[in-house]
Image: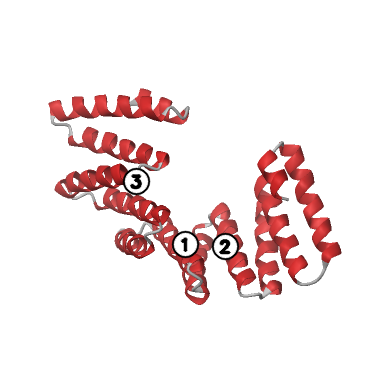
Amino acid sequence: ASMGVLELQLGNYEKAVGFFEESKQLAEESGDKRGIISNLHNIGYVHMRQGNYTEAIEDYGKTIEILEELNDRQEIAGCILNLGIIYQNQGNYARAIENYQEAQGLYEEFGEKEGASMCMNNIGLIHQHQGNYPLALEYIKKSLAIKEETGNKRGISSCMMNMGGIYMHLENYLEALRYFQNSMEILEQLQDKSGISNCLMDMGSAYRKMGEPQQALELFSKSLAIEEELGDRAGISSI
């Protein structure tokens, strides 16, 4: 399995699956349920990364069946969360929300706050995508409250960026700026240059919408300077 993990890190998905399948077969022969679970989970993850969603759903379904035999509810929650991500990627939002809510309930049951927060954030992003902004804000605010409680700075910054994005859609640009600026302060503490660049872009967009092109241009220029420093061609082309 360790060879599979290495190939996965290198992006050699087919080779990784081959190693995981081989390892899973050995685990099946020796009756090692934990080994079967670990390899099935890894195979599902690779299929998800490849966009082979039907296969990934099947892999996670099999994993959950064995986990239920072992009554391992924490691992089940992780698989259900991944299924939610797959359904979200497929555009099957109702099914995704169903999975996120189920995973959230399990995480809350055993006090796994970060897992519950992730589920809330993802539900919020689906509501944002569907244009249901008040509900999106409600979920992302709940997620943010947990991130603040656990002191997850990167998570706080991400939630604030999401909140800013929702306020942009609501055309409440001053509130959007407030969240972008709060996010920026955290990103500066984390020295996350790529995140800072994205934040500057979003702030520039807010000022442009507010009819302040000079301020917008200054922020776009700062973002461009960071992207050039990082050598991010994709980022530069989007500015």
Is there any visible trace of residue 147 in the rendered image? yes
> Are dots 2 and 1 in contact, CB under 8 Å?
yes
Task: Identify the element where label 1 is drawn.
Answer: helix
Crowding at dot 3, Cα within 10 Å, few <14 / some 14-19 / many 20+, comes out as many
Q: Which residue is mark 2?
A: 162
Q: Is residue 50 above or below residue 100?
A: above
Q: Which residue is mark 1?
A: 121
In the figure, is residue 182 to the left or right of 76?
right
Mark 1 or 3, nearer chain start: 3
Residue sitting at x 32%, y 64%: 98
Name which quarter of the figure residue 116 lies in: bottom left
Name the image quarter holding residue 202: bottom right
Q: Amino acid at mark 2?
A: Asn
**Label number found at residue 5:** none
- Secondary structure under the numbered disc 2 in the rendered image: helix
Could you classify mark 2 by the number of other residues whose Cα lies within 10 Å: few (under 14), some (14-19), or many (20 or more)? many
Q: Considering only vertical position in the picture, is 206 above or below 9?
A: below
Mark 2 vs mark 3: which is more N-terminal? 3
User: Is 68 or 83 nearer to us in this picture?
Assistant: 83
